[in-house]
Amino acid sequence: MEYEAMDNAKLSSVHKKITVLSIGGTFLDGFDISIISVALIVMSKTQFGINTALGSGLIGASTIIGMLIGAILFGYITDLYGRKTMYMYDMAIFIVMTVAEVFSFNFASLFITRFILGLGLGADYAIGTTIISEFSPVKYRGKLLTTNVLSWFVGAVAAALTGYMLLPLGDESWKYMFLVGVIPAAIILVLRRDVPESVRWLANKGKDKQAESIEYKLTGKSDDLKNISRDTKNPIRDLLSPKYFRSLLFVGIFWFTFDAAFYGISIFSPTILEFLGFTKRFAILGSAAFDSLAILGSFIAILLIDRMGRKAITIIGFAGMAVSLGILGVITHFYSTKAEFLVVAVPIFILFLIFYITEAVGPGSTDFVYPVELFPTEDRASAQGFGTSVSRIGAILGITTFPIIVESVGFSFSLFLFTGLSIMGLLATVFLGIETKGKSLEEINMIEEEGPKKVSSSADAK
């Protein structure tokens, strides 16, 4: 079996180090996306053009727009030229542009710096999960990949708490909120220098001696990788071939609908709580509480993903999102004033907690798993980049349309819209999703090319 030493290796400190350094980019994404939601409360609305729904939506989405381009572009470059190089550069981009955004003086300068920062984060989405998947033993791959969502919400909680502690500094506190993110980014950049190139990518490019050497250092064993099939394809052209149509359609629908609903709710959670009658400081703490409960959901996903499987927990997650948002829509339709909201404050808060837990158990975890498992080595980073880019389109629509919908037709209608998107994601998972639990990456690729009946999992073989 190809890469047997890698697939059957015991979980080691090297695997843990690679995972921690890879999910560091996801932590920074969670921090950055969440810190802007706090910063928007204190920034000068006139100076930065955020005194309109469109202006605040565009600033909120600026990093995500950059991620849309950065993920697919650098994912493609990563498949062509290797994982290691971009693994370093994308973190450097984040550091430089985070410092630069502190010196923003108007809408355009803030939007541009956050857009370029997003290019680096998008690249890291494509590269980080790809590296984890290609180094992980089969038995632990789901758990290690799912730590990405845990990392995202740890970053989000860190952002909310950072914003809360720095809020007393007044109108300039947003600058210090941004700068805090430079500290973990610099540590990650330094430590990533020791992460080796992917064994699978090296072997796929014909560098079998180098691949075998790294494999031996990691596992104490080495496979004969001379006969591994070589990559002679263009990653994007191969990705768009008919054999991957179902998987691309599934990843696109499932990740688009999830991010549209999730980002539409999460980035404006402090604003939503303030709108529902909570004080500014309590709204920020409430947002941190939501993200903390999502951390609990992430732990549940880590425990279940290699037991129940990817498809089952994704279905559970989308169902929980649809039910909680649907009931919230009904409640907020009949209770329309702040005084009325206070009467039902407890059930509203509980339903938001259910939303955050279930999304983290389901699609919020498996969106970091499915794209890198369903596609082969030569296309893997491009596939992750494609999924990330499509998801960012959903996120941008969720972020930019949410304040406009609330302003024009009401808060409850926006919740019904996100309920519908959650149902779409649920149906896509039921009818298009496949189970990848217990299979090597190469076995999953064979299922995609030859059909599920022709390939049994390694677990079944045992």
Image: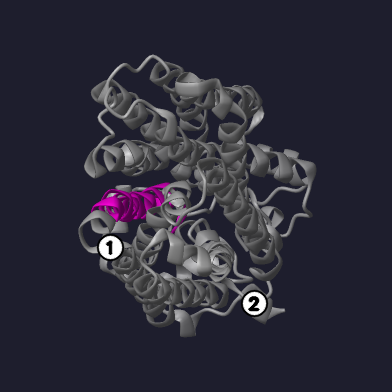
Circle on res. 398 = none
The residue closer to the viewer here, 223 or 19, is 19
Q: Amino acid at mark 1?
A: Gly
Magenta segment, principal secondary structure? helix
* Residue 148 located left or right of residue 65: right
Q: Position of residue 145 (x, y in %)?
A: 60, 54
Q: Position of residue 402 (x, y in %)?
A: 30, 55
Residue 73 visible, this orientation: no
Quarter of the image with the C terminus is bottom right
Q: Residue at x 60, y 71 (%)?
A: 437
Q: Residues within 10 Å of mark 1 (few under 14, many from 20)?
A: some
Q: Residues within 10 Å of mark 2 (few under 14, many from 20)?
A: few
**Disc 1 to disc 2, C-alpha distance:** 39 Å
* Colour basis: one colour
Which region shows up in magenta?
375-404
The residue closer to the viewer here, 106 or 424, is 106
Q: Residue tagged by mark 2?
A: 308
Q: Earlier in the sequence, mark 1 or mark 2?
A: 2
Q: Residue tagged by mark 1?
A: 410
The residue closer to the viewer here, 46 or 237, is 46
Check residue 439 for magenta coloring: no
Q: Where 367 falls versus 196 (above or below)?
A: below
Q: Position of residue 95 (x, y in %)?
A: 49, 22
Q: Amino acid at mark 2?
A: Met
Q: Residue at x 63, y 22 (%)?
A: 190
